Each structure stands twice: as structure tokens, then as C-alpha cells.
Amino acid sequence: MPETLAEVPDLINVLLESLLRDAPSEAHTAGLATCAMAWLTTEDLLRETVGDAAPDVWAWLRRRPFIVSRPTGLSPHDLTREVLDAEFERRFPARYRSLHRTIHDHVLAGIRATGGTDRQLLAQHLAYLHLRSPLTAAYHSLRAQGSAAVTPARPEEHGQLVSMVERAFDGASAQLAERWFAEAPEHLNVARTEEGVAGLVYHVFCPSGSALEQQDPVVRAVLDHVARTAPLRPGERVEIGRFLAGMHERQRDRYAVLAGSVTSIINWSTEPLAWSFAVFSDTGYWAPFFDYLGFRPLVTAELDGQRYVGYGHDWRRFPADRWFDLMFEREHSGGTGPPPDSALLPPPLGRAAFGAAVRSALPHLGRPERLAGNPLLGTVLGTEPVALRASLLAAVDRLAAEPKGERLRAVLTRTFIRPAPSQEAAAEVLGLPFSTYRRHLARAIEAVTERLWAMEIGTLRDRRVDGG
């Protein structure tokens, strides 16, 4: 018995010829392949995959008897989807990979650019692309039944959700959940079907200022690990997937999987995070999935005699854009385990060391080869001297958009970018008394350092890490 349709190409050929017999062009064939790969196909997505032919391809797809038209997009019947996907990958592996990348990038960009229902649908789409993950069966069963919506919980549902936590974990966890839900209800989300709430997920963001950070032994264990190994810097946060449960199958419930996947994808792609953790007691089910995600089992804690494991990832050493690239590779070809050590950035600099590194880098903007040993290399600003120089120049240039920033940019330009022979000469060129020039220079260095620091800790997304 074959495990996949790709193992029975003769059957595929018969089915495929039937499906493609009236495809008017290569663009229409590519549109079918897009439909096969995507959770839902929209006309916007088709513009990415077939270009100007998108309106014609969209109209043609809607008329196919094996395509279901939904309010949010198009999708083929399951057998059709499997036939098209398997054959496209077999016949055109390079084009298949390219199409997969286009869909992946389109969905990720959409998550970052939208909000609300659109964002959670796109997050479901990205989760569905992980066809080789250990949770594929859960995603496929959800698709077959019609997708649920992941939405914020309502206050009147809190009692029901606390009971759900108690069934999935224990009484002590339920008591903690009740307190967390009351303190920060905005982080409580549910998977909602026509029958009502089917699953929940709750994320803790630290530092929160709550006494529960120390009173919850699981959260305390996570924060103790962070403090021992790679402490938070000012402005940084830890995200902890603290509670995940479903109505029927506890921590393994497919609607809990959906809620956890959707909210985590959104958090990891849009929030400025230093660390992320997800905590489970049912490690037999979840350990393979987090191995696939590249998260490491870093923390253990006990509560009411039950052992919990926290799977964690330091985003400062392997930033989100690199991680999503790794996930694309695993979507396409599989793979497990953490990123190789050779791919990790150096341990993060503290604020004082970061500022000192900026001050030492600025005098070498005209000679990027002299940046080779600067501690900023390996930060979000760049891993090669040329990329680091570009980040520094861009930060200087963007000072002009701030109040009185043009004057600060001019001071930095005449001091470091197109330097005068001396600081006294720079002050003269700028028409400033030397004491005033020195004050402006100190203020300008501090302003550009603050901008660069905001980029480093993720509160400002000026540019992406590109590896160079």
C-alpha cells in the first residue's frame, strides 16, 4: 500500500490529465499548483504566482468543478489537492520549490502587514505549509472539517477555560491559570467553532510586573534559566506559551494545536522578543514538534508532582527572519534539531557594551575594513563589515526625520562620514562654536546609538538580518 500519491505516478497521470485537459496556459497550470499548495488561494496570492494573468486564472479556477469557493478564498477537494501537489513536485521540483517559497513569503509578509481575522487566517495558512511536521495530521484533519477561528477569549468564558486547563493539567495549574487570566486577559485566545470554544492557549509575557512571575513555579523556572544563561537587556521580553488545552484531547487536542500554532506564529513574526518558550507536561506528543521547530528542551519544573518541560529559543542568537528561512527549508524537505552552532550569532551585547561598540565604529565609517573586529558584528546590524557600515550610515541618515535631527546628522556627517581634518575644523565648517559642536556631537552619538539599540532589541524594524 503506497503511503503517498507520489508513489503511484501512473494513477496520478490519469487523474492529472483529466484535471489539466482544458488548462488554457502555463499560468493556469501554475494557478492550479498554487491552489494545491496553499491553505486558501486568493487573487492577491495569484498575483504573486502568475502575475498579470491572476484575474483570468482566478475566474477559471472558480469554474472548476473540483474547486470550492469560500468567502476567504479558493481550495480544491482533498484528493485533487494531493494529485496536483504530488505531480507538480515530481515533474518540476525546481519550480515547485520556487512556488513554495513565493507562497511562504507572501503569507509571512501578510501576517506582518495585517491584523485581526486576516492575520489569524494567514497564520493558519503558514502552519498548513508545514506538510512534513509531526503535527501534519492535526492540521489536515482540521482542514477536512473546516477551519476554526482563533480569537480572543470573552470574559464570560474564563470559568469554562479554567476547567479545560484543570482537565488537561491539574488543580494547581487551574488555580494559576485563573489568576493569570484575570491579570492579563488580553493574552488568552481560543479556537472557536460553530459549537463554541474547542481549545485555548495562554501566553505570558515577561517582565510583566506581576507577582505571579515568582509564584508560578513554571514561569519562575523559565525566568531563572534566562537570568543564568542570557539575561534580558533593557526593553527585551520573554514570551512563554504557558497553558494549552483542548475540549476533548487535552494537550493533544487538534483545536489546541491550532490555537497554539496560530498565536505563536503571530507572536514570533510580529513581536519584539528576546526569548520564546513553550511549556508542556505531555512531552511524548510535543517533543518531536519542537525538535522540528529547532527549539531546545531547556527548562524543567514540577507542579503538583507533575513534570513540565520548557522548550526554548533565543531570538537574539537566531533571529526570526533566519528562523523562518530554516522553517521554509523544513516545510520543503523536512529536517529536525536546533540550528547549527555555526549559524548562531554571538551572545548578545549589554547596553553599555553596545554603546561603546557604536562609539568605536563611527570613526571607521570611511574605512569599512577597520570594522572587522568590532563587537557589533554578529548583532542584528550585520555580520560583515560592509553590512554593518550600511546599518550605521542608514541610522545616521534617518536622524534627519526626527525633531532637530538634521543638525545632528550634519554633525555626524562632518565628523565621521565626510570628516573635516579635525573636530575644530568640523565645528568651523558647521558654523558652530567648538563647545556647542561638542555638545551636539555627544547628543548625536547618543541619538544614533538609541536608534541602533532599538533595532538590536527588536522594537524598531528598520532592516532585516541578511547574513551579511
Image (spheres, helix red, strand yellow):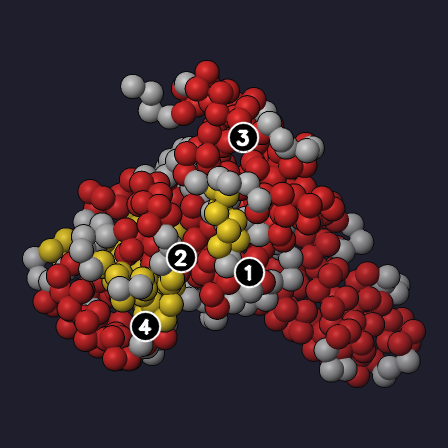
Q: Which residue lies furthest to the top in this view?
A: 10
| Residue contact between numbered discs 4 and 1, judged by CB atoms under 8 Å | no
Q: In which quarter of the image is residue 456?
A: bottom right
Q: Quadrant of residue 225?
A: bottom left
Q: Residue at x 36, y 75 (%)?
A: 186
Residue under label 2, please give it. Answer: 262
Q: Which residue is drawn at 74% across and 68% down?
A: 398
**Along the polypeptide, which appears first: circle 3 or circle 2?**
3
Q: What residue type is labelled 3?
A: Leu
Residue under label 1, please give it. Answer: 112
Residue under label 3, please give it. Answer: 19
| Residue contact between numbered discs 1 and 3, judged by CB atoms under 8 Å | no
What is the x, y in percent for residue 357? 61, 59
**Along the polypeptide, which appears first: circle 3 or circle 4?**
3
What is the x, y in percent for residue 86? 47, 28
**Where 45 falls versus 434 (above or below)?**
above
What is the x, y in percent for residue 447? 67, 74
- Closest to the observer, 140 or 333: 140
Q: Which amino acid does label 1 sit on?
A: Arg
Q: In this view, does 406 lie to the left or right of 225?
A: right
Q: Which amino acid does label 2 sit on?
A: Val
Residue under label 4, please give it. Answer: 153
**Along the polypeptide, which appears first: circle 1 or circle 2?**
1
